Image: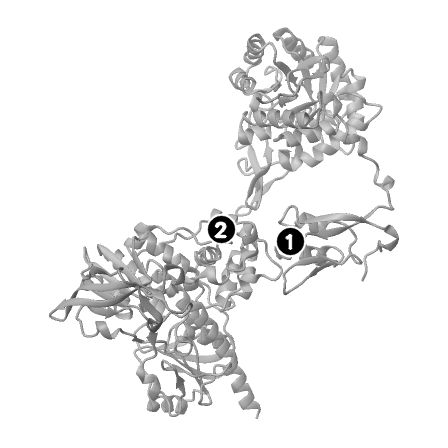
């Protein structure tokens, strides 16, 4: 019989059976979809951002998606021009109430966006009354068809603090503020949210980007009747950027708030990465757009097996362990030096390491034309490991530590 | 690895392997490791350089890929269809250590097809003239030589005995393996280089050669191929016993006259042409087609892909067997008798070395017997020019520069090598062109 690890988390005083949540997007558009997500195993849902249609009428652009493909690898990233919910507020509130009634043990987080202080207060109160467990403040949608909303609010410290404060006054629910990555330093905005009373930070929202251009008519995509705009980019391609932001939030001593991580999560390994960088809660959209709600099964099973294999009894034991190892580059150990090692029995002779080292590093790979085997000239190798990263045989190239006294640090010409 | 064969297409003599779609080609090109030393390129006898054209495909340089192919191998489209890639470019493919080799033939065909959708662009041709060269025989070697010479600014005229260019690919390779458009496309490229053809022109006589020299041709390249099929004495003189050259020509151009519907066919031989004959007979509607060869299945000279094709088409292999007798009436064979054999001495595949295995006698009904046991050059090659040295089965003797025993006369392709692949012939033609250029440059500088 399969053992199951305990994946429970407590996040802002709210109990989650597992940290996996839908992020605020079309994947949590209405009750029927959310119910299916709960049935599939998701621990919580951040419902698609509520809007008061009397304040601002939402019109969805069409088409609204463009994908980033790398050669034959499809959907490495996704660009969207999606707006917040275009459903009537009364329908969304009714759905939230229905979901809480039918799935009382699951967590429902209501995402809200206002266009003035009163909107924020009204939406917070309505969510609380409908039974939502938490609020997420959408300060970060990068493509709102409204000049004073979305990431423009998220770049304005005073507005973030003020709106958070309004929400905290209007409701007793825990509040997390969703950060935009479209900013140089995420910490001051997060601190502004904290000043306003935020209980947690979620990051990142999508990154403003242009994914593609139709070269037949010189128009960026998505081509919305002849025009386009840099809008929200998500998926595996943004995960490295999201990991950086999450680690910065975690390592900020003055912030010290729990984090819900978002950005390219598809597998239990992605989830683990964010936990190790300091996230307590995890949110997913693009992975579901691509593969459906079912992917949570493999996240749960994979993470559970990892915990059992490593004898981890609670996720709290591992949160932030990798973030603690992040330092400023000026603090790197300068006496540590490695050189590449090529496993001759695994080398298939393609010479990619040779080409890359020759044209992009320090000309330290020797390719024997007869045996077609690559080897490392340790005198020249600077230990950059470019060779390891280009090798098509994943376990062929490794590295070893060498005596720094013997190593020439500068490139030899 | 080659794309799959569609047996229904084979049965209709239509291109049996679909051209890769853009999506399939992008995926395949992205599997390529873009090796530093590109063993695929090193193993192409014609120097087609798959390592380069696959890189061009990967980086969406489709037209560049097509230019690389035709500049290096003027029969690039033909070769994309018929090359025994598993013995050549794909043999040393580095990725074989990890997964299936790259479908190089498929990518080659894709590049040519994709680029030609925008129309075939003329190949570069400068206005200056290096001299006049005559090529005798418009098959793969002659075409390869002519194209390479044209690139060196020679005026080349190909003298072709038949009414069309192409040689074996034109007349003897079945259309399910090689659609006519592929050859036509390559010939169009050749013509865009300014190469001239004289059809229905036989120059295989001393007078004709003398005339060529008088007409100002400074060198001659002989690429007349093979035309005389070997035959077993046992099968000599019967009205329903024919050689594979005649059969494949009929199967391609005069199918009805063969009248093979529901008939039984026996093919003698185990090489590529034997398999082409057997599969063509099946496609013509034959009921049972036997492939009888001295060589055992693992020893067949045919390529593995060809053997797979024959199996797919339900050819009955009687490998490791020999014909011992026949039943005939009015000079018409009705039944063949045979027996299984073992080798007296390992590795020597000759009838003298075969030892019949008692008790394995068999017989089969045969309405048509096709002999595909080899060919040699036509007898007329001996009259080509005074003193032209030949050897063995009548092939022309050349040195490593493709020079015959007569100065100024070069030769290559099947008429020299005794029968090899199309890509080999193109390569020999290309190399001979280089020798011809060196020869003429040296003569001018004297």
Residue located beneath label 1 in the image: A345
Q: Residues within 10 Å of mark 1 (few under 14, many from 20)?
A: few
Residue that appears at 56% across and 60% down = B51
Q: Can you say whether A22 is above or below B221 in the image? A: above
Residue B88, horizontal then vertical, whole percent: 49, 63
Depth order, front residue of A68/A268: A268
Residue A177 left/right relative to B223: right
| SS at badge 1 | loop
Q: Identify the subunit bearing mark 1.
A: A
Depth order, front residue of B185/A331: A331
Q: Does the image show residue B15?
A: no
Depth order, front residue of A409/A140: A409
Residue A340 left/right relative to B408: right
Residue located beneath label 2 in the image: B25
Q: Are marks 1 and 2 on the same chain?
A: no
Residue A136, horizontal then vertical, whole percent: 68, 18
Residue that appears at 74% across and 31% down = A245
| Quarter assignment of residue B337 | bottom left
Q: Identify the subunit bearing mark 2.
A: B
Q: Can you say whether B219 is above or below A117 in the image? A: below
Residue B362, horizontal then vertical, whole percent: 23, 60
Count of picture labels: 2
| Quarter assignment of residue A28 | top right
Residue A299, horizontal then vertical, whole percent: 61, 27
Q: Distance of mark 1 from mark 2, alpha carbons?
A: 31 Å
Marking on residue B358: none
Q: Nearer the viewer, mark 1 or mark 2?
A: 1
Q: Can you say whether A63 is above or below B159 in the image? A: above
């Amino acid at each position: 019989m399969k053992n199951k690890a305990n994946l429970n988390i407590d996040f802002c005083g709210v109990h989650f059976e597992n940290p996996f949540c839908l992020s605020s997007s079309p994947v949590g558009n209405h009750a029927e979809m959310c119910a299916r997500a709960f049935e599939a195993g998701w621990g919580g849902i951040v419902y698609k951002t509520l809007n008061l249609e009397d304040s601002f009428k939402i019109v969805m652009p069409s088409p609204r998606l463009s994908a980033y493909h790398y050669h034959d690898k499809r959907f490495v990233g996704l660009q969207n021009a999606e707006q917040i919910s275009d459903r009537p507020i009364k329908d969304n509130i009714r759905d939230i109430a229905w979901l809480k009634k039918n799935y009382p043990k699951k967590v429902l987080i209501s995402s809200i966006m206002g266009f003035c202080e009163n909107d924020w207060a009204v939406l917070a109160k309505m969510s609380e009354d409908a039974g939502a467990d938490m609020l997420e403040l959408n300060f970060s949608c990068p493509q709102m068809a409204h000049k004073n909303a979305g990431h423009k609010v998220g770049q304005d410290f005073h507005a973030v603090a003020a709106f958070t404060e309004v929400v905290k006054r209007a409701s007793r629910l825990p509040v997390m503020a969703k950060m935009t990555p479209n900013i140089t330093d995420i910490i001051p905005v997060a601190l502004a949210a904290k000043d306003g009373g935020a209980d947690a930070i979620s990051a990142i929202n999508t990154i403003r980007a242009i994914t593609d251009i139709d070269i037949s008519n010189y128009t960026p995509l998505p081509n919305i009747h002849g025009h386009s705009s840099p809008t929200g980019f998500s998926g595996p391609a943004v995960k490295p950027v999201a990991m950086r932001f999450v680690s910065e939030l975690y390592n900020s001593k003055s912030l010290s708030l729990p984090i819900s991580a978002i950005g390219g999560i598809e597998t239990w390994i992605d989830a683990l990465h964010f936990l190790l960088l300091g996230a307590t809660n995890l949110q997913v959209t693009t992975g579901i757009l691509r593969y459906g709600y079912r992917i949570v099964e493999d996240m749960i099973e994979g993470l559970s097996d990892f915990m059992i294999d490593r004898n981890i009894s609670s996720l709290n034991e591992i949160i932030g362990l990798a973030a603690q190892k992040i330092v400023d580059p000026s603090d790197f150990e300068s006496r540590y030096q490695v050189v590449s090692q090529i496993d001759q029995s695994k080398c298939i002779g393609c010479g990619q390491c040779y080409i890359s080292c020759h044209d992009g590093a320090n000309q330290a790979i020797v390719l024997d034309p007869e045996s077609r085997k690559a080897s490392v000239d340790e005198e020249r190798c600077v230990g950059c490991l470019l060779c390891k990263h280009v090798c098509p045989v994943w376990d062929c190239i490794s590295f070893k530590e060498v005596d720094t006294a013997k190593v020439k640090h500068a490139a030899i010409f | 690895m080659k794309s799959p064969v569609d047996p229904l297409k084979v049965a209709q003599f239509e291109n049996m392997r679909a051209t890769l779609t853009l999506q399939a080609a992008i995926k395949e090109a992205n599997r390529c490791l873009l090796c530093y030393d590109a063993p695929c390129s090193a193993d192409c006898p014609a120097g087609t350089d798959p390592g380069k054209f696959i890189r061009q495909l990967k980086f969406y340089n489709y037209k560049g890929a097509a230019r690389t192919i035709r500049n290096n191998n003027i029969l690039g489209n033909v070769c994309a269809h018929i090359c025994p890639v598993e013995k050549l470019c794909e043999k040393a493919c580095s990725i074989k250590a990890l997964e299936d080799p790259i479908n190089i033939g498929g990518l080659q065909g894709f590049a040519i097809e994709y680029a030609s959708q925008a129309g075939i662009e003329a190949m570069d041709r400068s206005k200056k003239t290096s001299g006049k060269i005559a090529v005798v025989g418009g098959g793969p070697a002659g075409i390869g030589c002519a194209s390479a010479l044209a690139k060196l600014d020679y005026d080349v005229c190909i003298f072709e005995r038949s009414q069309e260019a192409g040689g074996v690919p034109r007349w003897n390779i079945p259309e399910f393996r090689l659609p006519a458009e592929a050859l036509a496309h390559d010939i169009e490229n050749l013509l865009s280089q300014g190469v001239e053809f004289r059809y229905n022109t036989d120059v295989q006589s001393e007078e004709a050669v003398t005339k060529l020299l008088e007409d100002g041709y400074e060198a001659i390249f002989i690429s007349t191929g093979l035309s005389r099929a070997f035959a077993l004495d046992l099968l000599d003189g019967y009205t329903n016993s024919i050689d594979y050259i005649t059969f494949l020509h009929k199967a391609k151009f005069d199918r009805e006259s063969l009248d093979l519907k529901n008939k039984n066919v026996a093919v003698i031989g185990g090489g590529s042409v034997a398999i082409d004959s057997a599969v063509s007979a099946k496609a013509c509607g034959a009921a049972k087609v036997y492939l009888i060869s001295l060589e055992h299945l693992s020893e067949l000279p045919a390529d593995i892909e060809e053997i797979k094709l024959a199996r797919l088409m339900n050819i009955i292999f009687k490998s490791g067997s020999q014909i011992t007798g026949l039943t005939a009436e009015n000079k018409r064979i009705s039944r063949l008798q045979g027996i299984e054999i073992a080798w007296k001495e390992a590795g020597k595949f000759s009838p003298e070395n075969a030892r019949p295995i008692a008790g394995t006698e068999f017989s089969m009904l045969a309405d048509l017997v096709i002999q595909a046991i080899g060919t040699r050059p036509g007898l007329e090659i001996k009259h080509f020019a005074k003193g032209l040295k030949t050897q063995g089965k009548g092939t022309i003797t050349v040195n490593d520069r493709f020079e015959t025993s007569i100065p100024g006369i070069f030769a290559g392709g099947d008429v020299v090598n005794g029968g090899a692949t199309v890509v080999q012939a193109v390569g020999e033609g290309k190399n001979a062109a280089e020798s011809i250029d060196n020869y003429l440059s040296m003569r001018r500088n004297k």
